[in-house]
Image (tube, rainbow, N blue to C red):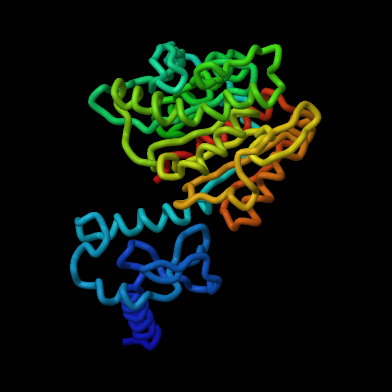
Amino acid sequence: MKFNTILSLVVATLACKVTADCFASEFNQPCCKKATNALISNEYGTWSIENGVICGIDAASTTLEKRGNGNGNGNGNGNGNGKAKGLKKQFYMNYVTVEEFCPDDIKQVRENVTYPEPFKVHYYSTTTQSERPMNIVLPPNYNPKKKYPVFYYLHGIGCNEDTMLEEGLNAVTIYTNLVKDNRAKEMIIVVPYQYAPAPGTEVSEDLMLTPEYFEGYDNFINDLVNDIMPFMKKNYRIANGRENTAIAGFSMGGRNALYIGYTRPDLFGFVGAFSPAPGIFETTDMFSYHKGLMRPEELVADPSPFLTMLSCGTLDFVVVDYPEQYHNALEANNQKHIWYTIEGANHDDVAIMSGYYNFITNIFNI
């Protein structure tokens, strides 16, 4: 046998041995070849990212003890898929991709594609003690025998449950085209009416830019959690768990989505804030005083969202630098998140569609 052939066999044997001995293979992941920077350590070991793939650096002592039991902390089928899935949840934002603008072809109605029609329902709110409207968008081929993740999409101040579905924002078109292109998961989209004042506290829209009016938006968290979510679960096929629940919005909707997502991280695994308005922290902007809902150091979620995404146009004169303030607070609090700006966008449809497109594309991919 030639020397080169023998050498090849030795190399192949060693390669198989290395693969077999790599602790990460138990989790259906490779061991790192070059990466040494530890991004996370957990009960399974120390991990990094190499060429866009999660790889193992060192095994935890408990990992070695779990070998040989067939399923460990996996899904019970013996191949470790559950473990790999658990790791992806921790590294989720490493896999997120962002485009500055929503592509034109995604915004356009296509021939021979059936786009779902939003429909309006009414529910009784114990929070406001009144009947309230909201719009629902079901997947194009909604199957009542199947369960779907749900995305709560919130409008800005002075708007209503119809605003985010207006023709110029292309919400249904973008969503449906992404599903058809296999770039987004099928989901139920819920667009509620956000102004939810407690009984006896309703304020006229003439006083829209006042702390008293803002309180009706602050109270929406109770309407969402105590009334809307139970209504959806009772009447539609909703998949359970924070890994199947997303919340995002624009302007005041973005502010509320961020606040609600970080106040109830047990319920929401995906959080998006597109050009979020001031008001989470105490401040006075060019329009009004905001009493604040928490201090900057309190913008912390445990468990952390799988995805938090913040965006804003570079020419936004309405919310100015408040979105960046939220970004800075999250960064100071070591809360992993995605932050990006849209060049030339104002507080407008360009900013809305950019945030919506990127969020829809990147949620529920666990």
Q: How many marks?
A: 0
Query: Is residue 100 in sight in this rendering?
Result: no
Which residue shows up at 65% across the image and 49% down it?
A: 296
Rendered position, 273 above or below 202: below
Q: Is 68 situated left or right of 228 in this image?
A: left
User: Which residue occupies the foreground of this view, 329 or 185?
Assistant: 329
Q: Is 257 situated left or right of 296 in this image?
A: left
Q: Position of residue 257 (x, y in %)?
A: 55, 34
Which residue shows up at 67% across the image and 23% down it?
A: 349
Q: Is 16 situated left or right of 75 in this image?
A: right
Rendered position, 248 above or below 213: below
Query: Which residue reaches farthest front?
Result: 200
Q: Quadrant of residue 55?
A: bottom left
Q: Position of residue 353 (x, y in %)?
A: 62, 27
Query: Is residue 300 in sight in this rendering?
Result: yes
Quarter containing the N terminus: bottom left
User: Which residue occupies the foreground of this view, 40 or 235?
Assistant: 235
Q: Position of residue 125 (x, y in %)?
A: 41, 19
Which residue shows up at 40% across the image and 12% down it?
A: 121
Q: Quadrant of residue 113?
A: top left
Which residue shows up at 54% across the image and 26% down it?
A: 154
User: Which residue occupies the foreground of this view, 234 or 114?
Assistant: 234
Q: Position of residue 34 (x, y in %)?
A: 53, 73
